[in-house]
């Protein structure tokens, strides 16, 4: 298990990765900035999902609920009240954590587990989407367009398109989320959470408060995911119910963790690095395909099919994800 690895090694790897990743905007083309930011958002979402579902053992198919709360908190407080996105990000994290604790209490109170828990999380995400669609408070289905500023502003978290500061802010948020994850897994609460995941009955017999530690894990997971939502809204300057609470956001939270390795610290990051640019690569290949793929040129939807095929190949060859499979082979 990843948490058996000395926590200092994780911190050293995190420091090394940060040092390597920080100067990338200075040496890569400006056109790649959007891809890099998308990778960071995917990684943030996956880190949040993995904490609850990978380490906590609570499969969540409604991560869009927490993502959307963060996105809407940012957009609503900024557009309606002129509040800084930094403050809105904190408000969104608190709101998402409280909602996750309520969701967890209701589901665990009535012993909703396994596939039924996954369906319950999906239902709550859909409930929030429908509320947003029909609520004048958040501008119904129209959503929010965040107004453009005439000049860059750190306080309002808005810069010119392609500005490297978006990348550095996203990288800082990802590093902080990984630090929070590593610290939590090293703590007493994190160890109890993993013990509950591995054997709930044995954990209860040892006197571990199962409900308490599950709710704590869900709250931290939701807070991390909501920060990804707030950063997404601020980067793309638009949010509506389908973008914020739609099933696609839940899927984009799950896929990087599954491809990289569920229940590992670095799996979500590796999965995001693979999936983030993959859609652009497949679209580029099919726009000007090599000769042996010339039959696919100009056919609508083929990039999505190729994307799906590549995912299937990865999962067949590496059933524990990229990081999980490589780790197990190195150990053997």
Image: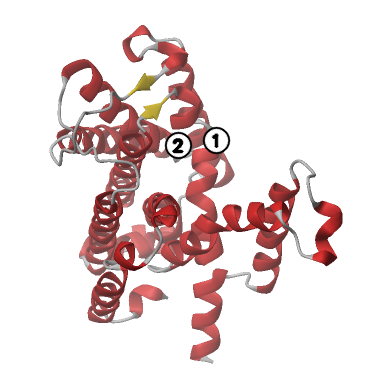
Quadrant of residue 190 within the rendered picture: bottom left
**Can you see residue 10?**
yes
* Residue drawn where x is 27% and y is 21% of the image: 76
Q: Secondary structure at mark 1?
A: helix
Q: Residues within 10 Å of mark 2 (few under 14, many from 20)?
A: many
- Looking at the picture, how far across and down is residue 123, in whole percent? 52, 29
**Can you see residue 117?**
no
- Looking at the picture, how far across and down is residue 137, in whole percent? 32, 10
Q: Quadrant of the N terminus?
A: bottom left
In the image, 176 versus 100, the foreground residue is: 176
Q: How many marks?
A: 2
Name the mark on residue 247: 1
Quadrant of residue 144 within the rendered picture: top left
* Residue drawn where x is 17% and y is 18% of the image: 81
- Looking at the picture, how far across and down is residue 253, in whole percent? 47, 48
Q: Residues within 10 Å of mark 1 (few under 14, many from 20)?
A: many
Relative side of 83 to 113, left or right: left
Tell me which numbered mark, 2 or 1, is placed earlier along the sequence. Answer: 2
- Looking at the picture, how far across and down is residue 311, in whole percent? 65, 60
In the image, 71 versus 330, the foreground residue is: 71
Q: Secondary structure at mark 2?
A: helix
* Residue drawn where x is 36% and y is 7% of the image: 136
Residue extending furthest toward the top: 136
CA gap between label 2 and label 1 equals: 7 Å
Q: Quadrant of the C terminus?
A: bottom right
Query: Contact (CB < 8 A) between labels 2 and 1?
Result: yes
Disc 2: which residue:
64
Residue extending furthest toward the bottom: 332
Rendered view: 306 above or below 14: above
Residue extending furthest toward the right: 295
């Amino acid at each position: 298990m990843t948490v058996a690895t000395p926590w200092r090694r994780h911190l050293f790897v995190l420091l090394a990765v940060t040092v390597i990743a920080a100067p990338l905007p200075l040496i890569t083309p400006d056109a790649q900035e959007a891809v890099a930011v998308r990778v960071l958002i995917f990684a943030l979402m996956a880190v949040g999902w993995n904490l609850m579902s990978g380490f906590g053992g609570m499969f969540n198919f409604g991560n869009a609920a927490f993502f959307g709360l963060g996105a809407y908190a940012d957009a609503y407080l900024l557009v309606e009240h002129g509040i800084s996105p930094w403050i809105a990000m904190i408000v969104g994290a608190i709101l998402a954590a409280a909602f996750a604790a309520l969701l967890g209490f209701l589901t665990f109170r009535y012993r909703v587990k396994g596939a039924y828990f996954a369906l319950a999380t999906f239902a709550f995400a859909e409930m929030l989407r429908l509320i947003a669609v029909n609520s004048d408070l958040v501008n119904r289905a129209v959503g929010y367009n965040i107004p453009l500023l005439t000049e860059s502003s750190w306080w309002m978290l808005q810069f010119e398109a392609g500005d490297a500061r978006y990348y550095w802010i996203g990288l800082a948020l990802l590093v902080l989320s990984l630090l929070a994850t590593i610290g939590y897994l090293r703590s007493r609460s994190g160890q109890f959470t993993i013990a509950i995941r591995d054997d709930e009955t044995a954990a209860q017999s040892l006197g571990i408060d199962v409900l308490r530690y599950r709710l704590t894990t869900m709250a931290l997971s939701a807070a991390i995911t909501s920060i990804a939502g707030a950063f997404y809204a601020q980067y793309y300057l638009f949010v509506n119910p389908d973008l914020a609470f739609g099933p696609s956001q839940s899927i984009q939270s799950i896929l990087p963790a599954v491809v990289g390795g569920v229940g590992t610290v670095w799996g979500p990051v590796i999965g995001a690095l693979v999936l983030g640019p993959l859609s652009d690569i497949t679209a580029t290949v099919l726009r000007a395909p090599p000769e042996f793929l010339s039959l696919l040129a100009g056919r609508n939807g083929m990039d999505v099919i190729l994307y799906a095929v590549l995912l299937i190949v990865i999962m067949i060859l590496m059933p524990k994800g990229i990081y999980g499979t490589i780790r197990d082979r190195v150990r053997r």
